[in-house]
Image (cartoon, grey):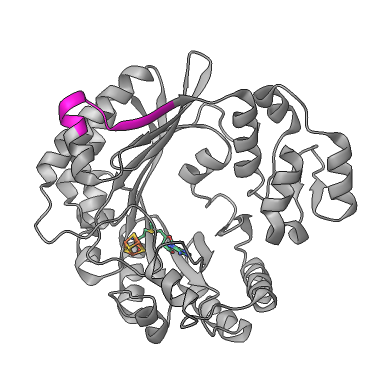
Amino acid sequence: MTGDDRAFGVYIHWPFCLSKCPYCDFNSHVRRAPIDEARFLRAFHREIAATGQRTRGRTVSTIFFGGGTPSLMQPATIAGVLNSIARQWRVADDAEITLEANPTSVEAERFRGYRAAGINRVSLGVQALDDRALAELGRMHTAREALDAVAIARAVFDRYSFDLIYARPGQTPHEWASELGRAIGEAGEHLSLYQLTIEPDTPFAALHKAGKLKTPGEDIARALYDTTQDVCAAHGLPAYEISNHARPGGECRHNLVYWRGHEYAGIGPGAHGRLDIEGARHATANEKRPETWLMRVEAGGHGLVTDEVLTREEVGDEFLLMGLRLAEGIALDRYAALAGRALDPERIAALHQHGLVETTPDGRLRVALAGFPVLDAVVADLAA
Ligand SMILES: C[S@@+](CC[C@H](N)C(=O)[O-])C[C@H]1O[C@@H](n2cnc3c(N)ncnc32)[C@H](O)[C@@H]1O
Ligand code: SF4
């Protein structure tokens, strides 16, 4: 298997933002009243303890504070959560501990505090290096502020990454190549590059439906994707996952836990987890609404609303769905062990013939460059 097969990640969700971006459907909420962080910390502590009891003996290899906007948390709250984690599990000496941050100046000022609390990697939501595009995306920072935050991240942390959104309305491959080139000049070992998705029930979906927001058509979207691959590869940042680029060794180890089908605990409102308990894989999901999650944890010690054992077929399907996003692909024998059946060699051969998948020299199956734009169809075909 590629990677450490005992990898165990802990995901902590902070569900608040200063404002809601019109494209975003993450579990993030805007509250007028100040957030009672001490109350949240007590609830995190209880939920971590409840999860720890079910997963004794694990060594935590990665921790990820995601959101929402976890860079709105006080460094002391982050330190408290990390203490709770260390009381439940052994934390590996080289554990990767990431915090997602918004690139406003206020939040960047806290970076030293986060490092002192134990964070060793930040991932910044830069989104665009163009002020007009940032305004259209409803962002509360300028490109200058974002780049200043990146510079602070670079000075404070050994490892940092930032996100950009492309395939924005009116964007041409030429403009994107130049913006991406500038971004790479500011990048360290890792970049996340997401194609703008119109998520249902967001303000962008309503504008899109009304014809007031035009996203690039299929051909331009494909050209933008190809530009992304070419520019990044030429600068030593190849895609190791469909939207994530890194210099070799700079990959986000926490996200690799998901994509390689390893185990992770989901803590906080709306967090998901995958836990292996007594030989069965459990899919867990927490109550999404922050206040309801708090009340559930305070009453019962955890915020779980779903805790179901997956069938072998479901585990196999999930392994395909996640693993085939990776450039390294999947080991066929691991699929067979998880799913209880091998993939159909005839289907693999047909996909090979169409140039959509390829086999690596060490026998792994991976999606070919031509297959990534139709990844969902490839996975559906193999899983059928
Ligand atoms: C949950 S956000 C957290 C980061 C942080 N709150 C911020 O916005 O700076 C993670 C990333 O998802 C991406 N994202 C969110 N909604 C998206 C959409 N509809 N299409 C493409 N990317 C999206 C953005 O790049 C964002 O930085
Ligand atoms: S993109 Fe980030 S800041 Fe904007 S609403 Fe989503 S989580 Fe919050």
Is residue 27 or residue 38 the one in the foreground? 27
As drawn, is 307 to the left or to the right of 294?
Answer: right
Front in this rendered view, residue 102 or 170: 170
x and y, in percent, of residue 32 in the image: 12, 61
Looking at the image, can residue 2 be seen?
no
Left or right for 322, reference 29: right
- Which quarter of the figure is the N terminus placed in? top right
Residue span colored magenta: 296-307
Q: Residue at position x 61%, y 68% from top?
A: 232
Above or below for 230 versus 179: above
In the picture as drawn, the residue positioned furthest to the top comes out as 278
**Quadrant housing residue 34:** bottom left
Seen at 29% across and 66% down, the residue is 20
- Of the four image quadrants, the one with ligand 2 is bottom left
The residue drawn where x is 35% and y is 81% is 135
Residue 105, given in percent of the width and then of the height, sits at 23, 71
